[in-house]
Amino acid sequence: MKAVWLDLNSRRIEEGDVPEPVFDSDNQVLIRVVEVGVCGTDRDLAAFARGEAPSGETTLIPGHEALGRVLAAGGAVTRLKPGDWVVPTVRRACAPACRACERNRRDLCVSGAYTERGIFRRHGYMSERAVDFAGDLIPVPEEIARFAVLTEPLSVVEKAIEKAIRLHEEPIERALVLGAGPIGFLAALALQARGIEVAIHSAEPGSHPRVSKIVSAGIGYCTALDGHAPRADLVVEATGSPEAAFAGFRCLGPSGVYAVLGGGVGAGHISFLDLVMKNQIVFGSVNASPESMALAVRDLARFDRRVLEGFIRRVPLGAFRGGVLEPPRDTFKLVHVLTE
Ligand SMILES: [Zn+2]
Ligand SMILES: [Zn+2]
């Protein structure tokens, strides 16, 4: 079957034929991979800045934002049948399972010995077929199949938003999202769908094609945080830029919650006195829980379909190298079509 892989020794991106995945358990499901989205993690992988091959191998098939259709299900699988649309979760539990993995919260794994498909010690989905245990596949309804490739990145956002809502002492009224990339825009859409007034701050000028898509979705946009920046109950950082992340603290209101998703590394300044005197909370969040995957499926069904159409550009698998090395300017998400 056709696949794309990263050779971690020669540091090359390659494309060709690989062996079919092994489908040998009653609890497993063989899927046809239909689409795979690309994100900043894939760009880091393609730059050989992160990622690890499966044990004993020197190559890694990337791709963790996948949409598939069931081709065959093992005898013990009752909730999936051929033809069903599915989205795989990314993280697999550590073994022996830590206390978080034991209760199916691998996103909170405390041992660090988890694996992640397409990122860390497990092949991903940039191949025509894949095998997973049924419990690692989220069924998605046919009605949202056209956009379901966004389920995984949206689930990361949903986890952070739900946590912020739990942590904030009052209902969240205003939110500020830092970053006009796919995670920032998905966060803004998920906040807007909850009735929260939301604006995105980013460096792109107002004339940038992605900014016009943000504005036409009814989301505010600003390029400067100084002066008139609004006080936000929630700030979601999705830039990866430490400078922008530190600047965002200036907009955090009393009892405000600050969710960090971008994960940039750098030095800056925050006021512990402000944190104390304003009862503020800062947290980081990665990966997704089963609940946040379900929320992502729910929200994809209620987001404006025209906005989602403008979010995605579909390209063939052969375009992986170009797309991963040079992200598109005029759209948010490159999606590779593996099989029709
Ligand atoms: Zn991703
Ligand atoms: Zn664990």
Image: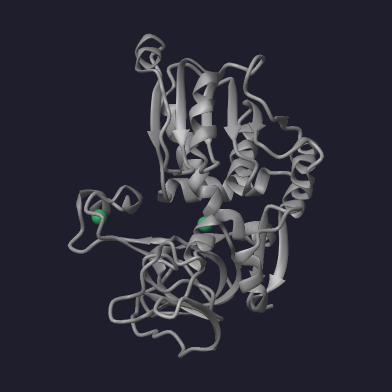
**Residue 191 percent location from the top left of the image:** 60, 33
Residue 30 makes an appearance in the image: no
Identify the residue at the far left of this view: 96
Nearer to the camera, 53 or 98: 53
Which quadrant of the rendered structure holds the C terminus?
bottom right
Identify the residue at the far front of this view: 267
Nearer to the camera, 18 or 180: 180
Q: Is residue 340 above or below residue 219?
A: below
Left-right relation of 123 to 109: right
Give the color scheme: rainbow, by chain, secondary structure or one colour.
Answer: one colour
**Residue for point 31% across, 47% down:** 108
Nearer to the camera, 76 or 108: 108
**Residue 71 percent location from the top left of the image:** 54, 80
Q: Is residue 79 above or below residue 288?
A: below
**Residue for point 20% across, 53% down:** 98
Left-right relation of 72 to 186: left
**Residue for point 66% across, 62% down:** 334
**Residue 96 percent location from the top left of the image:** 17, 62
Left-right relation of 294 to 53: right
Left-right relation of 302 to 17: right
